[in-house]
Amino acid sequence: MAQPLINLHNHSTWSDGHYSPEQLVRMGIVSGLTHLGISDHYYTAKLVAEGTYVDIDELEAYVADLGHIAEVYAGQIHVLAGIEVDWSPRAEGVLSALWPVIDQLDYVLFEYVESEQWAGYSLEDLLAVLPLIHIPVGLAHNNLSENFAPSRTPGELVSVLQEHQIFVELSTNPLTLYYRDTDPYSLRLWGSLVESQVRFSIGSDTHGLIDHVANVRDAHRFLEERGALDRLITAWWDPSQRVWSDRQR
Ligand SMILES: [Zn+2]
């Protein structure tokens, strides 16, 4: 198989992105991506004024739209349907409606997990809902050292993520380029993550600039240099089994 080149964090006109899913997919093809994921925002109070999110009653149409585009471009790129969940009280009251229908998506990104700055819910709270979700679950652009250093050693964090099969996104957005941080906690954490069985996603958090779709090469280089490029969430995932097939015994 050709080297993967993935970008699974892109916002479209279904939420607060400026480009349609099809425009994003075409840019993904031009950029040489093997996988492009659309990860629009699920309901969150922070976007209520603009009304730019996927509401629960729009979810089916959203998945159908992305599924149609995936079919049209199937020979050229893998198109995945994701969703980004604001893991905080800003989404309170609408989260429980999501779990029964979430499995029709290909993956889910949780943002602000255990973030004090963004008043995020805890990782423990996330573990509590995991049994209701059977698609890959990951942490989006999480400032891991800031959010988890107070409560866990790097080794403790890695073992929780590994045990519960929670993937970590390498965000190439310059505002959240945390995998390149060089504080002691981050260096130890990433050293440990790449040695573990934790999975990775890569995403640019595209909103308003189409060029951002192509901005993922540094994160691929980072994983490749550490021998971890074979643990992207796009590899080995078997939706019919709801498992990563290289884990089957
Ligand atoms: Zn996002």
Image (cartoon, rainbow, N blue to C red):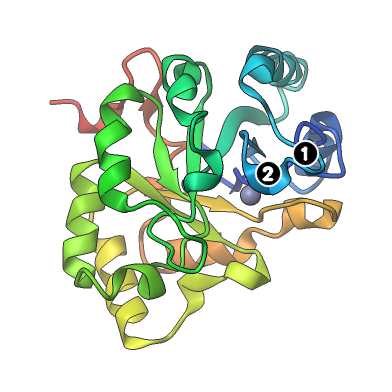
Q: Residue furthest bottom?
A: 183
| Residue depicted at 58% across the width and 68% down the height | 176
For the residues bearing labels 2 and 1, Cβ distance under 8 angstroms:
yes
Q: Amino acid at mark 2?
A: Leu
Q: Is residue 196 left or right of residue 47?
A: left
Locate residue 76, reporting x and y percent.
73, 28
Q: Check disc 1: other Cα within 10 Å, few if <14, some if 14-19, many if 20+.
A: some
Q: 88 or 102: nearer the eye?
A: 88
Pointer 1 residue: 29
| Mark 2 and mark 1: Cα distance apart in space | 6 Å
Pointer 2 residue: 33
Q: Is residue 74 visible?
A: no
| Residue depicted at 50% across the width and 69% down the height | 117
Q: 150 or 133: nearer the eye?
A: 150
Which of the image's four quarters has the C terminus? top left
Q: Check disc 2: other Cα within 10 Å, few if <14, some if 14-19, many if 20+.
A: many
Q: 170 or 72: nearer the eye?
A: 170
